[in-house]
């Protein structure tokens, strides 16, 4: 095993131990990677620091991805601490809560731009800033998407449009960076009860009907996503780039809900 021995990963998006980024961090650590963490703002540090330290990490730096300066600063610190970074994990999204209810047609200009800035441009900005840190041998960039990018998911609204742009950004980044051996992929995860999902009205019902319709008849976990992330970051996935890989119990292959319970 130990698919990631000798590799270094920078992980953006841990808020707590329910975060998808945390499932990914644990899986990368299990496979032997050295980890660095970044969190959004001061109030999250007390959550993230003990989690990071439990995996032997000492690189724990703030970066609000809405700021070019903070992106540049965290990458400069990572260069100083690690020299090179092999794996970049982007597990960040944000939209105004009021834009995740009601109708998409009512999205404001500011709400639209905010969702795209934090959830999509941040992947481009972080990837560009990380380019000088990838070794000659290449690297792996991973981000998180959702099925609402492809089909209309009730109330996902502006986030669905942002995820469509995120998946397209993965393809364009993969085309740009392929020649230097940097692979860029997305994982499209099924609904998971994280901080970002809490407070979404009807999320429990969403998960229930998801599990009932999905071939595997269960919801996915942050460990399921972590296992796929570790694979995609590893040499075993050396021929995969620009792809969106579903970790969704097979939900996306179904045309209709199951006839039986
Ligand atoms: P989460 O709340 O644990 O993680 C979201 C992270 O985004 C948090 O750590 C938050 O601090 C960070 N963030 C928000 N604004 C930021 C900013 N300005 N600067 C830096 N960081 C910022 O929730 P999660 O569900 O683990 O979300 C991670 C990713 O997974 C997101 O891209 C989300 O869209 C995606 N995703 C989630 C699900 C789900 O059902 N939970 C399904 C598919 C995809
Ligand atoms: O990508 C997501 C969630 C992203 C998200 C969540 C929030 C909640 C709190 C982005 N911004 C915010 N802003 C907040 O203020 N998911 C895939 C989980 C999710 O969110 C939904 C879903 C699913 C699934 C929203 C509506 C409908 C389904």
Image (tube, rainbow, N blue to C red):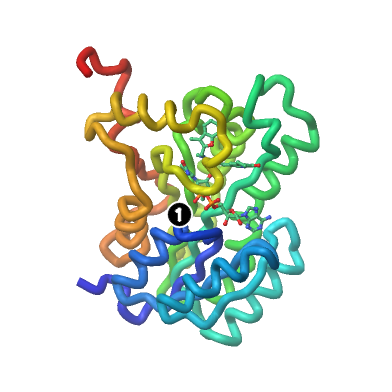
Residue 98, position in %: x, y? 70, 31
**Can residue 184 be seen?**
no
Graded by Cα atoms within 10 Å as few (under 14), some (14 to 19) or many (20 or more), the crowding at tag 1 reads: some
* Residue occupying image coordinates x 58% and y 79%: 78
The number of callouts visible is 1
Q: Quadrant of the C terminus?
A: top left
* Residue occupying image coordinates x 73% and y 27%: 107
Relative to 64, is 228 on the left or the right?
A: left
Q: Quadrant of the N terminus?
A: bottom left
User: With respect to residue 118, does 101 lie above or below?
Assistant: above
Among the 4 quarters of the image, the one containing residue 136: bottom left
* Residue occupying image coordinates x 22% and y 34%: 216
User: With respect to residue 177, does 175 lie above or below?
Assistant: above
Which residue is tagged 1?
18
User: With respect to residue 158, does 175 lie above or below?
Assistant: below
* Residue occupying image coordinates x 52% and y 54%: 91
Residue 174, position in %: x, y? 48, 53
Relative to 54, is 173 on the left or the right?
A: right
Q: In what element is the residue under mark 1?
A: loop
**Can residue 129 be seen?**
yes
Among the 4 quarters of the image, the one containing residue 147: top left
Relative to 83, is 124 on the left or the right?
A: right
Residue labelled 1 has its Cβ within 8 Å of some atom of ligand 1: yes
């Amino acid at each position: 095993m130990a698919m990631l021995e000798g590799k270094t990963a920078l992980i953006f998006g841990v808020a707590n131990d329910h975060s998808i980024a945390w499932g990914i961090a644990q899986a990368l650590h299990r496979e032997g990677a050295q980890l660095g963490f970044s969190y959004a703002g001061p109030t999250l540090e007390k959550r993230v620091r003990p989690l990071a330290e439990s995996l032997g990490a000492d690189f724990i730096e703030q970066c609000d991805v809405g700021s070019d300066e903070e992106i540049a600063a965290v990458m400069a610190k990572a260069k100083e601490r690690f020299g090179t970074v092999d794996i970049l994990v982007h597990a960040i999204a944000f939209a105004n809560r009021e834009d995740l209810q009601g109708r998409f047609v009512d999205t404001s200009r500011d709400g639209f731009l905010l969702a795209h800035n934090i959830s999509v441009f941040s992947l481009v900005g972080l990837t560009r800033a990380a380019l000088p840190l990838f070794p000659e041998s290449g690297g792996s960039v991973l981000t998180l998407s959702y099925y609402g990018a492809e089909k209309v998911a009730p109330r996902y609204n502006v986030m669905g449009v942002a995820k469509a742009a995120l998946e397209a950004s993965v393809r364009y980044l993969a085309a740009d960076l392929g020649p230097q051996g940097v692979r860029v992929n997305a994982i499209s995860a099924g609904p998971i009860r994280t901080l970002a999902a809490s407070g979404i009205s009807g999320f429990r019902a969403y998960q229930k009907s998801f599990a009932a319709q999905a071939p595997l008849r269960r919801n996915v976990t942050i460990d399921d996503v972590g296992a796929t992330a570790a694979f995609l970051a590893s040499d075993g996935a050396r021929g995969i780039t620009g792809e969106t890989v579903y970790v969704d119990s097979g939900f996306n292959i179904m045309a209709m809900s199951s006839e039986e319970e």
